[in-house]
Amino acid sequence: MKNEIILYRPDEIAEHIEVRLEDETVWLSQEQMASLFNQTKQNVSLHINNCFKEKELEKEATVKDSLTVQKEGNRTVKRKIEYYNLDVIISVGYRVKSKQGTQFRIWATRVLKDYLLKGYAINNRMNRLEDNLETLNHKVNEINLQINTHLIPTQGVFFDGQVFDAYELASKIIRSAKQSIVLIDNYIDESTITHLAKKNKNVKVLLLTKNTGKQLALDVQKANEQYGNFKMKTFTNSHDRFLVIDGNEVYHIGASLKDLAKKWFAFSKMDKSSLKIIDNIKSAIENEY
């Protein structure tokens, strides 16, 4: 509601009054109030001054100056005129005991309610448009991600239940290998091998784990017979889990491959600043093939 004009045309007044609507209230000048209440401008001014003098209202919150263009004879003159909001108008109406004041209050209240509801409806519509735009942007991002599925994120966090997303990430990393995959994980089982079986043909897989039981050895043997190039070795130097791709890309994974998305876990691709740990991993596995 900004600088709008609406006409007030009661039966008791010969001419209409141009009422300003701004800042969620209505505004009239002293001259307009004099016409509304059938009073002199001097009398209206007296009641307004008494209203402020008696601390009924604060002038700063209820009065606004406005530059108005007026015709004075043959001249067009710009004058600064004080306008008063609905609180002042109602106060003056009570003081002059004007029936017109009561009618104006009822009319103004209805008008303000209508304008506020209209503004609320517009805001709701804008909010819906913003929500629709956000949804559209999300879909566009999803499409872009699908278009760029060959790109593997370098870090992230997965939460409970994000099984598909976690498995998809693991599959992308595994399928990115062209020569070799080394998994350092102390909790390998058959499901881990199932993940690794998604590798490209002829890619070698080395499993380094401290728990090399008979069942796991049998699972590795079956994988080697079916997919080829699977090997396992006892390895006790690591507490964390690492996935090494082609000997030069190392992923630090917060959960065992068999437990993906069962609990919160993070992953990150180690950058060049982590060359020392990468060299240590390479040193531990370089004689295995």
Image (cartoon, rainbow, N blue to C red):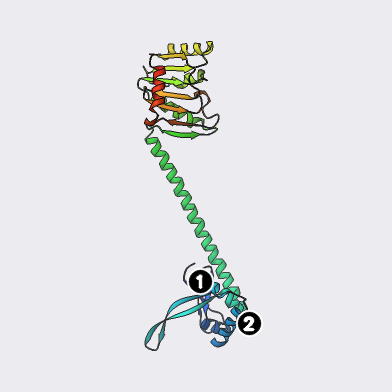
Q: How far is mark 2 from mark 1, CA to CA? A: 23 Å
Q: Secondary structure at mark 2?
A: helix
Choose the circle earlier in sequence order: 2 or 1: 1
Q: Pointer 2 and pointer 1: residues touching (CB < 8 Å)?
A: no
Q: Is residue 274 visible?
A: yes
- The amino acid sitting under disc 1 is Leu
Point out residue 66 in the picture as x, y percentages from the top left corner.
46, 76
Give the residue at mark 1: 21
Point out residue 170 in the picture as x, y percentages from the top left corner.
45, 27
Q: Is residue 40 visible?
A: no
> How many neighbours does mark 2 have within 10 angstroms: few (below 14), some (14-19), or many (20 or more)?
some
Q: Secondary structure at mark 1?
A: strand
In the picture as drawn, the residue positioned furthest to the front comes out as 276
- The amino acid sitting under disc 2 is Arg
Q: Residue at x 57, y 67 (%)?
A: 113
In the displayed structure, would residue 201 be above or below residue 71? above
Query: Quick one: 13 or 180, which is closer to the camera?
Result: 180
Label number found at residue 95: 2
Horizontal relation, residue 91 to residue 186: left or right: right
> How many neighbours does mark 1 have within 10 angstroms: few (below 14), some (14-19), or many (20 or more)?
many
In which quadrant is the C terminus drawn? Answer: top left
Horizontal relation, residue 200 to residue 97: left or right: left
